[in-house]
Image: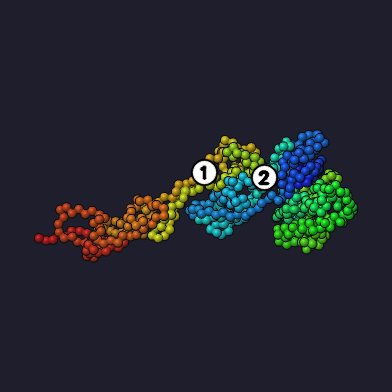
């Protein structure tokens, strides 16, 4: 026996504790304890009274410890499937086309997409939203370069990159309430999974997942759904109603308090005639079939909701439906689900713990469909298929990281609500202006990335982090704004090149900024209009370009352009050869 796990299923109606271990391919149940909440401290799988739930957990833990003879220090738990939120998001960036795309570009793009995903859930900005949700994980659906799908962006070049991701979140309130209960009982969190994942681990093992099956875990407050196809579980869903709906219908019909209504509902399975006392103190006896008539509509409604969600997720009726959870035993429910899915009624069945051959040690108190999920929680933890959970510190603030993979510094910062701008640094704002009527953009410089240390040592974004790691981050700084001078945009096309007495002379263009004359050294301001054009030259302009020494010169001035006689008003073009000299006049 390598290790054993204490699994806790904190349900709407009961708390189940199971201690189990793995031996070969079998899961062995060492001991278990089942306890009902003394009051309705949970609704729809959510803890509403931490103290009451903690007391139930404490009693389960202490009873087990007395029989086992040692202390239980950690617990594996599950969050209700109703809490799981999955969302798709896209992010895109404009980048320099001259630089290869590197890992930081890709991580920054992923961070932006993740920020958009969580903002779409909460409507808040990224930093505030991460205070409300744990990111369970995310995966890339597709990368794009210049709007076209591509397998890998690394090393590519282009102006625009984008990514589609699917991200999964759990509300922090759900996770934190579970942690709060465990702390009050002296327990640490061993692992966390989702209830439909735990149930499907046992009820739909890998060998069955090539079939298109629907697993429905019908508890007291919620009905969680998992769907298999082509070898894997491909979708999860939830219906926010289950066994409690039937109990409340019985209470309403016969004026019973909730505890009495719950007892009556359970005895429908085992008795033909049921005796009960209503809130007025009247004692009554009714046939079970009479009571079932009063809840027939509620059972049909529950089955219709479950079937509708299955069809929504699966797109068509599944090959079969497996039901687990205490609510799956409701008389008539299986037949109603089959009718709503329009499949044969023998294609909907109940999966019990004792029917799972690789689980040993279940007893009369831990059997039937209700026991599948609590044992599945422990089996998931033993197999390492739960969501890993560690606590690290970012700038001295505690951050809980959920994820199956070994978390990195980058993931810790993302979970702490740091945006890509705070990690990588935003580039400086671009300079935009019009040059000869055409829009020009001069990008700002790249930002200065954050300086990060882990436990006092400099660290990179891909470095792994462990439980208790202390991450300090000196946030990234934005880059400088884009700047440019006129000279940066002057090229040979703007210059007039002439040859004067064999000497090559480039003539700079005419420059105007916002209709005012400017020079090549002048800085261009944002949103300005810049004009750069060739000068229109005549021969007389030469005397403003070069100096002629006229001292001691006499005779007649001779001007030739391309070896032809010319005057001061002769126009000059690019490449013209000009000769200017004095020809002595005979006396």
Q: Quadrant of residue 396?
A: top right
Per the rendering, the mark at residue 276 is none
Across and down, in percent, residue 221 comes to: 75, 50
Q: Residue at x 83, y 48 (%)?
A: 280
Q: Quick one: 105 or 418, which is closer to the camera?
A: 418
Q: Position of residue 133 (x, y in %)?
A: 64, 47
**What element does badge 2 sit on?**
helix
Q: What separation in Å lies between label 2 and label 1 (alpha carbons)?
A: 30 Å
The quadrant of the image that shows the N terminus is: top right
Q: Residue at x 90, y 53 (%)?
A: 272
Give the number of the disc on residue 476: 1
- Labels 2 & 1 near each other (Cβ < 8 A): no
Ranked by sequence position, the earlier of labels 2 and 1 is 2
Could you tell me which quadrant the C terminus lies in? bottom left
Left/right of residue 148 with respect to residue 6 in the rendered view:
left
Query: In this orientation, does residue 92 appear?
Result: yes
- Element marked by disc 1: loop
User: Which mark, by number, is residue 173?
Assistant: 2
Q: Image quadrant of residue 339?
A: bottom right
Q: Nearer the viewer, residue 114 or 307?
A: 307
Give x and y (percent) for residue 217: 76, 52
Q: Is residue 279 left or right of residue 583?
A: right
Q: Camera-side residue: 399 or 82?
A: 82
| 360 shown above or below 439 | above
Residue that lies at the very extreme toward the front in this rendered image: 280
- Outermost residue, left direction? 587
Residue 504 left/right relative to 424 = left
Q: Does residue 380 show up?
A: no
Near mark 1 (Cα within 10 A), the count class, few <14, some 14-19 or many ≥20, is some
């Amino acid at each position: 026996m390598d290790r054993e796990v204490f699994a806790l299923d904190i349900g709407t109606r009961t708390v189940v504790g199971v201690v189990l271990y793995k031996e070969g391919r079998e899961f062995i149940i060492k001991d278990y304890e089942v306890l009902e909440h003394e009051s309705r401290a949970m609704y729809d799988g959510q803890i509403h009274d931490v103290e009451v739930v903690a007391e139930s957990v404490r009693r389960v833990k202490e009873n087990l410890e007395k029989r086992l003879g040692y202390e239980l220090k950690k617990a594996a738990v599950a969050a209700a499937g109703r809490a799981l939120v999955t969302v798709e998001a896209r992010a895109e960036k404009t980048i320099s086309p001259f630089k290869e795309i590197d890992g930081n570009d890709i991580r920054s793009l992923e961070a932006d997409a993740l920020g958009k995903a969580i903002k779409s859930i909460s409507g808040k900005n990224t930093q505030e939203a991460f205070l409300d949700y744990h990111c369970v994980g995310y995966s890339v659906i597709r990368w794009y370069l210049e709007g076209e799908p591509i397998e890998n962006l690394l090393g590519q070049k282009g102006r625009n990159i984008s990514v589609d991701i699917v991200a999964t979140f759990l509300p922090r309130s759900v996770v934190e309430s579970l942690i709060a209960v465990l702390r009050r009982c002296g327990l640490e969190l061993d692992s966390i999974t989702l209830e439909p994942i735990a149930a499907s681990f046992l009820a739909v093992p890998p060998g069955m997942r090539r079939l298109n099956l629907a697993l429905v875990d019908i508890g007291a407050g919620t009905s969680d759904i998992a769907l298999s196809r082509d070898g894997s579980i491909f979708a999860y869903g939830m219906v926010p109603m289950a066994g409690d709906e039937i109990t409340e219908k019985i209470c309403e019909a016969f004026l019973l308090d909730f505890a009495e209504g719950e007892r009556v509902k359970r005895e429908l399975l085992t008795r033909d005639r049921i005796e009960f006392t209503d809130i007025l103190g009247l004692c009554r006896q009714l046939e079970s079939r009479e009571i079932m008539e009063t809840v027939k509509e509620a059972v049909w409604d529950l089955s219709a909701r479950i079937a509708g969600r299955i069809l929504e997720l699966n797109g068509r009726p599944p090959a079969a439906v497996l039901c687990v959870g205490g609510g799956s035993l409701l008389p008539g429910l299986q037949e109603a689900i089959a009718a709503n899915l329009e499949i044969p009624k023998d294609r909907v069945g109940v999966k019990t713990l004792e029917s799972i051959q690789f689980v040993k040690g279940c007893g009369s108190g831990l059997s039937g469909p209700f026991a599948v999920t609590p044992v599945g929680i422990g089996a998931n933890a033993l197999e390492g298929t739960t969501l890993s959970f560690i606590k690290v510190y970012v700038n001295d603030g505690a951050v809980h990281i959920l994820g199956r993979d070994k978390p990195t510094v980058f993931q810790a910062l993302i979970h702490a609500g740091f945006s890509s701008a705070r990690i990588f640094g935003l580039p400086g704002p671009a300079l935009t202006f019009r040059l000869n009527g055409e829009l020009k953009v001069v990008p700002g410089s790249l930002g200065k990335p954050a300086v990060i240390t882990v436990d006092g040592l400099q660290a990179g974004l891909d470095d792994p982090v462990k439980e208790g790691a202390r991450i300090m981050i000196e946030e990234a700084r934005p880059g400088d704004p884009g700047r440019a001078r006129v000279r940066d945009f002057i090229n040979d096309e703007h210059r007039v090149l002439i040859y004067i007495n064999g000497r090559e002379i480039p003539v700079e263009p005419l420059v105007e900024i916002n209709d005012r004359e400017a020079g090549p050294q002048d800085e261009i301001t944002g949103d300005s209009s810049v004009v750069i054009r060739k000068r229109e030259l005549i021969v007389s302009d030469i005397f403003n370009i070069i100096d002629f020494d006229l001292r001691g010169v006499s005779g007649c001035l001779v001007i030739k352009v391309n070896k032809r006689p010319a005057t001061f008003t002769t126009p000059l073009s690019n490449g013209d050869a000009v000769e200017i000299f004095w020809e002595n006049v005979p006396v």
